[in-house]
Image (cartoon, helix red, strand yellow):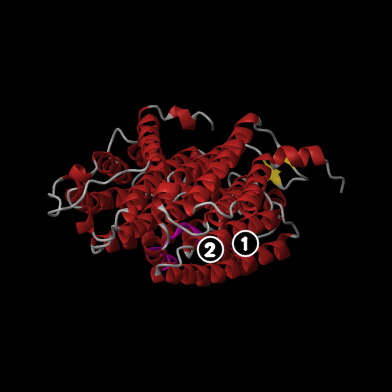
Amino acid sequence: MTIDHSELLHAFRPEACLVAGALLVLGLDLATGRGRTAERRARNAALLGLLALAAALAATFAAAPSGPLAAGTMLLDPLARVTRAGVLGLALLALAATPGTLRLPHAAEYVALLLFATAGFTLMAGTTSLLLGFVALELASIALYLLAGFDKSRPESAEAALKYFLFGAVAAAFLLFGFSLLYGLTGALDLPGIARGLAAQPVSPLLLVAVVMVLVGFGFKAAAAPFHLWAPDVYQGAPAPAAALIASAAKLAGLAFFLRLLGSGLTAPAADGPPAPWTGAVAVLAVLSLVVGNLAALGQGNVRRLLAYSAVAHAGALLLGVLVSGRAGPGPVVYYAVTYGLATVGAFLVLAVLDGQGGAQAHADLAGLHRRSPLLAGALAACLLSLAGIPPLAGFLGKFLVFAEALKAGGPASLPGAIALLAIALSAVALYYYLIVLKEALVRAPAPGAPVIRVPAGAALSLIATVALLLALGLVPDLLLRRF
């Protein structure tokens, strides 16, 4: 096989920027960090990290979508381009708020891990190879395990990292075994080759086992029930900016990779053929996630755990979008994932600022937030209302697009239509538990002697940008949808 190195550079320019930025952050901190204060080292590392993310984002927009690259292992299409831009933008928002909200003794290592994780996300967005996809997934996962436990001053952070690692290792084993079965059935590692191999043979029990194995790994990455048990502890214990990345960019990148795998690799090309072998299993995961996530969130007194179970519920809606993506294309479900990621990042950034002022875990810790910091209160309201699906915020249109496509797929009596009706009914439950949090932040009076909260400049800019994007995408959805 002849390798065109200029083609490789074209395909992997964003990843090259991220890896070079991570190495530069580590090298400069090692060479010049001694004798400087921890705050200055953190600012320098964050600045270099932001420059690397901005360069990767510019490289993503500079490359026009094209066909297969790098010997067929990458596909630069609209799905890859939008997902790459989405994960880079979410990482930018999370990193910009880090220096003023997170005080860590090893900031350069933290920023480097964030860049390595983002490089894994961007690789997942465009890969059409099982081998490269698994490598990218594990690159991102290992970095996220370390980020989850990076705050060694808090036992909860170490517990979160351990649980995340153990669950992730088991899920990776299931996923790799499923990939090996697919390779054994088809003799191919690329998605088009797998699709051709499966189209030439009937559905076998071994294929069903492979599909189940793959969906276990996907369910873990998406925090879908019943593979969600790691999420509440990780969301609660991880540093808030790291939890924001886990909850948003990781879910968007994983969705893009498995959307491509399920849609391009495991679906027979014939339009009049039988349903894809993964349809029933995905429908079951969607229903379980919607029910478990929304009902479990009702009983949560911890804001972070509430956001974790909310993520489980949103994973169910994303799985519904995967079900109808063959008819509607990837646009609606990717729009949903991007807008969900923005709202989740904004909510965790508010919690990150509060952590720097003494912490915010219980609902009562948010009491009087509208008086202590109108910016934080307004940003939290916008993000939670977007998650609840209130117009004109982008979360409303994300839900509308996915649910409408599900109902159009066969009416309310069809499987996607019935799941959409269930999701619409449970949206009322979701609105209730979001309003419980907002009641504390916007209605309750602050505790006596509660100080005014100073919002660091980076966090303020990130929150303003997040709310502006939620409004812009809600009012002008074609900013994103026309990319497809």
Majority SS type along the magenta span: loop
Q: Residues within 10 Å of mark 2 (few under 14, many from 20)?
A: many
Residue 224 is a magenta residue: yes
Q: Where is residue 191 in the image (x, y as percent from the top left)?
A: 68, 51
Residue 399 lies in what quarter of the image?
top left
Residue type pointed to by label 1 = Val
- Asked which secondary structure carries label 1, the reply is loop
Residue type pointed to by label 2 = Leu
Highlighted range, magenta: 221-232
Residue 474 lies in what quarter of the image?
top left
What residue is at 28 percent from the left and 39 percent from the top? 375
Residue 290 is a magenta residue: no
**Which residue is the site of mark 2?**
146
Sequence-first tag of 1 and 2: 2
Q: Position of residue 321 (x, y in %)?
A: 45, 47
Q: How far apart are marks 1 and 2 (CA)?
A: 40 Å
